[in-house]
Image (cartoon, rainbow, N blue to C red):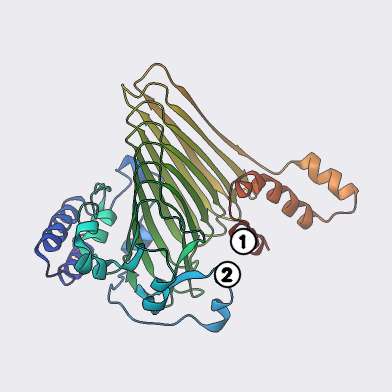
């Protein structure tokens, strides 16, 4: 273990930035990485996710500019506001892109934003996510790429903004660090997609931090469809002020080993959040979701609804946690996780948790694991429907409720097509 820690420590040291406050931030993160190392099964939060296959390899963090091949470009989400981030680097010309945005809105490479708008970046960068393990710390210590999105007060971005991540370099590591700041009464939809060249072995270690001021509304999509040989570690951290509304729609399809975490802090009254997720691991895939919602104050609402469809020799983990503080009376928290096993070799570990320290709350949680309904399959067979087609109908019905939570019709259709392709 010491050799691989030294390998990543050296990469972090080589990424040190010249600004004193950033260099200090990176140094603290590197110290945390040296202290925590990579998580093991001794860590309760990583009990069901084994990192041996990751630790046996070396991923290099040098940014190598690449291009998205034409066939893949045709598969990208068909929306106008789209940044393509290839092997960690933005390949768009941002000047004409920025001219199309509402007045005062900023979409910039993170390092450029730090130089030009430090007053908007410094109060929030690396302030939301506490380093709980080595991947968090390594992302902060390297801090080499990412996007800064700033929404001024009252600004509404009417069309979704897509951050399309693509990797095609073998054994490369990228560490995107995105920061989204939405001032009061602003609105936007942000889509993060993650994809890669088939069978390429690489690492994505991404952190996205989102700050919502009073009455801000933000819808966030994470659509993970990495190469089936890739490793994906991601964390979304959100801080919400009074009457803000946040939606997370998480779709996880690709990757060899995937860990996708969300932490949401409801810090002022009447904040609301929705966390909607679908994951479909197949043969030799491991997909792990951990979610945490902190109800710090009264009269906030959180809803978590995750579903999994597991095929072949796959494994999934879902751990959803809601923490309601002593003074957070009149909180409402609902959480459910349902799983459909398509194979006798598929495994799922599900653990919804409630930690409630207030007494006047409405909190529910539940989890189920099941198989396709044989009676329904028999009925469809009697109507001349093939077993394969009947399976697809039942799986689509299982996922429909979560897909219908997606508010944007073009995004919903695109995701549905990805899922259908996965099921073929």
Write down the quadrant of residue 190 in the picture. Answer: bottom left
| Camera-side residue of 415 and 283 | 415
Residue annotated with mark 1: 410
Picture disc at residue 78? 2
Residue 74: percent from left, percent from top: 58, 77
- Note whether 28 is above or below 142 in the view shown: above
The span from disc 1 to disc 2 (Cα, nearest Å) is: 8 Å
Q: Secondary structure at mark 2?
A: loop
Tell me the residue at 23%/53% (across/down): 126
Residue 139: percent from left, percent from top: 27, 60
Write down the quadrant of residue 340 in the picture. Answer: top right
Write down the quadrant of residue 181 in the picture. Answer: bottom left
Residue furthest toward the left? 20
Tell me the residue at 49%/75% (across/down): 197
- Note whether 68 is above or below 377 in the view shown: below
- Note whether 65 is above or below 210 in the view shown: below
| Camera-side residue of 413 and 12 | 413
Is 386 on the left-hand or right-hand side of 73? right
Tell me the residue at 34%/62% (across/down): 104
| Quadrant of image for the C terminus | bottom right
Is 386 on the left-hand or right-hand side of 261? right
At label 2, counting other C-alpha atoms closer than 10 Å, the crowd grade (few under 14, some 14-19, many 20 or more) is few
Picture disc at residue 148? none
Residue 70 showing in the rendered view:
yes
| Quadrant of image for the N terminus | bottom left
Mark 1 in CB contact with mark 2 (< 8 angstroms)? yes
């Amino acid at each position: 273990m010491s050799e691989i820690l030294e390998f990543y420590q050296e990469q972090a040291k080589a990424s040190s930035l010249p600004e004193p406050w950033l260099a200090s931030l990176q140094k603290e993160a590197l110290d945390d990485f040296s202290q925590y190392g990579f998580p093991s099964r001794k860590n309760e939060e990583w009990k069901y996710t084994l990192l041996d296959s990751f630790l046996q390899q070396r991923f290099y963090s040098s940014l190598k500019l690449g291009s998205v091949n034409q066939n893949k470009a045709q598969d990208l989400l068909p929306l106008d506001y789209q940044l393509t981030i290839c092997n960690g680097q933005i390949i768009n010309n941002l000047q004409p892109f920025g001219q199309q945005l509402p007045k005062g809105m900023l979409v910039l490479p993170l390092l450029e934003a730090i130089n030009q708008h430090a007053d908007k970046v410094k109060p929030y960068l690396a302030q939301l996510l506490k380093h709980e393990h080595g991947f968090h710390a390594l992302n902060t210590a390297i801090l080499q790429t990412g996007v800064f999105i700033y929404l001024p007060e009252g600004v509404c971005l009417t069309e979704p903004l897509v951050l399309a991540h693509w990797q095609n370099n073998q054994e490369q590591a990228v560490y995107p660090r995105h920061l989204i700041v939405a001032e009061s009464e602003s609105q936007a939809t942000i889509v993060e997609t993650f994809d890669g060249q088939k069978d390429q072995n690489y690492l994505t270690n991404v952190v996205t931090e989102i700050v919502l001021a009073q009455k801000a509304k933000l819808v966030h999509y994470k659509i993970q469809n990495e190469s089936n040989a890739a490793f994906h570690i991601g964390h979304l951290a959100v801080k919400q002020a009074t009457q803000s509304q946040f939606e997370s729609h998480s779709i996880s399809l690709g990757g060899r080993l995937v860990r996708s975490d969300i932490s949401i802090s409801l810090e002022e009254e009447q904040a609301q959040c929705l966390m909607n997720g679908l994951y479909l691991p197949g043969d030799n895939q491991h997909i792990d979701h951990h979610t945490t919602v902190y109800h710090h104050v009264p009269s906030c609402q959180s809803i978590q609804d995750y579903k999994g469809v597991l095929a072949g020799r796959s494994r999934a983990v879902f751990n959803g946690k809601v923490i309601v503080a002593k003074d957070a009376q009149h909180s409402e928290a609902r959480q459910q996780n349902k799983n459909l096993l398509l194979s006798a070799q598929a495994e799922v570990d599900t653990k919804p948790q409630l930690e409630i320290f207030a007494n006047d709350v409405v909190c529910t949680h539940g989890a189920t694991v099941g198989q396709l309904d044989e009676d329904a399959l028999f009925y469809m067979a009697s109507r001349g429907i093939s077993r394969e087609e009947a399976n697809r109908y039942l799986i689509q019905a299982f996922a429909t409720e979560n897909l219908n939570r997606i508010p944007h019709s073009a995004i919903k259709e695109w995701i549905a097509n990805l899922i259908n392709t996965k099921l073929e």
